[in-house]
Image (spheres, rainbow, N blue to C red):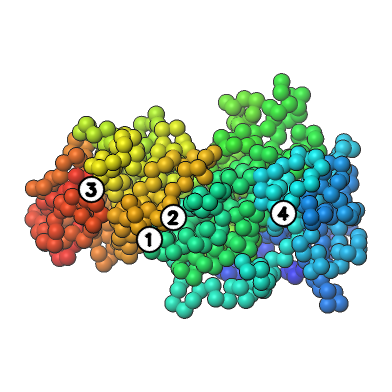
Amino acid sequence: MDGFEVFRAEITFPEDQAGTTFRWGVLLDGPAGRDLWAISAEVDDEQSFARERSFVLGSDAPEQIYALTWCDRLGAVRLPAVGGRSGIRFSVWAPNARSMDLVLADPAVGYIADDGTGTVRTIPMRQAGEIWTAGPEADPMLADFDAMVGTPYMYRITKDDGSSAYRTDLWSLMQIGAGDVDPKGAVYAGTPEALDGPQSCSVVCDPRVVALGSGQIVSAEDFWSDEFPPGISIETRLEDLVIYELHVGALGFGKPDAGTLDDAIAFLDHLTTLGVNAVELMPIAEFETRRNWGYGTSHFLAMDQWAGGTDRLKMFVKACHQRGIVVILDVCYNHFSPDAERVQWAFDSNDHPRNIYYWYEGRPEDYQDPLGGYVDNLSTGWAPRYDEEAVRQLFISSAAFLATVCHIDGFRLDQTSSIHQYPVFHSDNDRRVERAAAFGVKFLKQWTRTMRLAKPGLFLTAEDYSDWPALTEPSLEGDGLGFDATWYGDFHHGLMEHENSPHAHLVQEAGYGDGRALAMSAFAGALASSSRAKVVYNQSHDDCGNRKGSARTLPLAVNFAPLVGETRRWAEARARFAAAVTLLSAGTPMFFMGEEIGAIKPYRYDDFVQHREDITGEAIGDGAQLFRYYKDLVGLSKGSGAIRSRNIAVSATHDANRVLAFHRWDETDAFFVVGSLADAPFASGYWLSDKRIGDGEWVEVFNSDAEAYGGWNIGNGSRTLRAEGCALNVVLPSSGIVVLKRVSGP
């Protein structure tokens, strides 16, 4: 097909079968196994889970084609070589367009105004169904892919109403802009670098090569050849990960603007010393301006140019892999960029129902406000049109590209409940859009199935608070949604805070300092449920000051009292408690950047640059003791099979005494974790009793109150604790955790 390698099968049918409907599919042998059903998309019927294709046999029946991804179908694609030279083909999905042109731009400007200023060449495109293309047959200039690399371009679309508009290539691998300037269609005379990426020209790139920081160009094969030094590998089980959530833009302390992937690469020494074995990057695909969290994606295959672009992402991934660190990328498919004028919005039609990338119900005249037919979903934009394969493939193919070309090890999907649970009419948020929700489910299944087929072993997690069991049930060989785990918000809310909610809010409540009873028993349920395919966290990007009532752990832990002297000491003690409960739980633990050094400034989407903290400096300064604690805790967490198992049993809770105890074990070891948020130690011991304690001997192997961590050094020392009658007396520090290991006994 179009000169690319495909699998083909030719079948001859008897003439008397004309008019018969045939259903078909594909069995695949690949990296995920043999004889796997390779149709990942379900039929266009919200009541059916069938994964099949069909056609009616006749003389005019078209060739039947199924593509797992569209990676070589849209965008600027290298064609197979003819006569020693590869051409280039530009393809774009625009089913409503009357006509289309490929417009090449002045590379010194990188922008085309609404009146065409900035254009250096116009090449007509031809239509084939819903796809418009331009290749060597359209212009001899397109016969040489290599000569086109670096060329900026856009598409000029004549819409269905005769109006024209310039649009970027949604499948581009690079946007030329790296700044904040949006000319809004006016003539632009500045530099390409100053442009805001989503509005700037797309650029032809060659994914077969990598541009190094020095400017040297190397083949992708050579670049990845030393990805894993001898003796270095990455974890393959989600349970074995300790995840560090990282926002690249919040790095670059001391610099005037947002951080970059070069800053992230330099930051890896800190992460290596800390000992985490996985880093989760907040979204890095192209987004508006330089100072942004990244959740309003405009171009899903082009990495943000200010951050460094796609090749810098590859360099970051390689640097992580050389240190044995897994890279998980946060991606957002529940809405598009808020300012999508030159991207998805009204791409080829100004008629709302024909706004091809956005879900719209009915006709504009059905609503008092014509916008009422769009679908809200509790994200920061309108829902994409998940019942359209071309829209789904923008998300699916970009992930496949990131996994196979950029070597990403896993993905975290942002707010999947917005995709399958929350769709409602913009005109009436009490009316659910059932078809949008149903096709949201179908999309998520198709996405996970494709990822499992393209790169088995990817870590697939979802930010989803619905607690729907199907989310973590298999999708490739079943009808589940196919994720490995979901983020567990209730764990954070019970451990830390969540304004106006019924959760335990342990650390926040302890911070009032009045000795009030804490709902340890209520939190015990969330702790026990951490075993059910959950990513648990004491803090995430959403919880450090951006959401009302939220804050960094240290100020929250002392009710925002000045963090000086003994007050800071108490704050750090409670922070150590929260970290230990997280990293010693049965879930996959994660914490947000800066927690390991006691960051105190709020982290918010609109002013994070002004509130950056010197994480690497604090790790050897005022935050050194907390950093040492996190380092040792991470080592304990990832170094024990018992703690990285899913086995957990809550042994005891006492709300008035503020005590919580739980067991972790495997076939080799058994640990007993006992924590207290009391304002005074149990220096003479605290009696605990349950069958798992048994009548054996236990020793303390970890104590959050150690002097080296800034604690008061209250604990059990090196002495052996002997249990009798399944009861054990354990010395507990105030606001601390002790970890005991069984050394003898049943």
Please identify, in this view, whether the residue under mark 3 or under mark 1 is nearer the observer.
1
- Count of marks placed on residues: 4
How far apart, in angstroms, are the residues tagged by discs 3 and 4? 51 Å
**Spatial CA span between label 2 and label 3:** 23 Å
Under circle 4, the secondary element is loop
Q: Are marks 1 and 2 in contact (CB under 8 Å)?
A: yes
Up the image or down, 365 lies above or below 327; here it is above
Q: CA distance from mark 4 to mark 1?
A: 36 Å
Assess whether mark 3 and mark 2 are in contact (beta carbons under 8 angstroms): no
Q: Identify which amino acid the numbered label 3 is placed on.
A: Gly
- Point out the tag, 3 or 1, that comes first from the N-terminus: 1
**Cα distance between the residues tagged 3 and 1:** 21 Å
Callout 3: 10 Å neighbours few (<14), some, many (20+)? many
Task: Give the Cα separation between the discs numbered 1 and 2.
Answer: 10 Å
Amino acid type at mark 2:
Tyr
Q: Position of residue 615 (x, y in %)?
A: 42, 53
Residue 736 badge = 3
Residue 286 visible in the current orientation: yes
Instruction: Indicate the quadrant containing the N terminus: top left, top right, bottom left or bottom right.
Output: bottom right
Label 3 SS: strand
**Mark number, residue 274:** 1
N-terminal of the two: label 1 or label 2?
A: 2
Disc 4 target residue: 176
Which residue corresponds to the image point at 51% horizontal and 53% vertical from the top-left? 252
Where, quadrant-wise, is the C terminus in this rendering?
Answer: bottom left
Q: Which label number is shown at residue 515? A: none
- Amino acid tagged 1: Leu
Q: Marks 4 and 1: CB-CB under 8 Å? A: no
Task: From the image, tell me which residue sits under label 2.
Answer: 244
Q: Nearer the viewer, residue 481 or 140?
A: 140
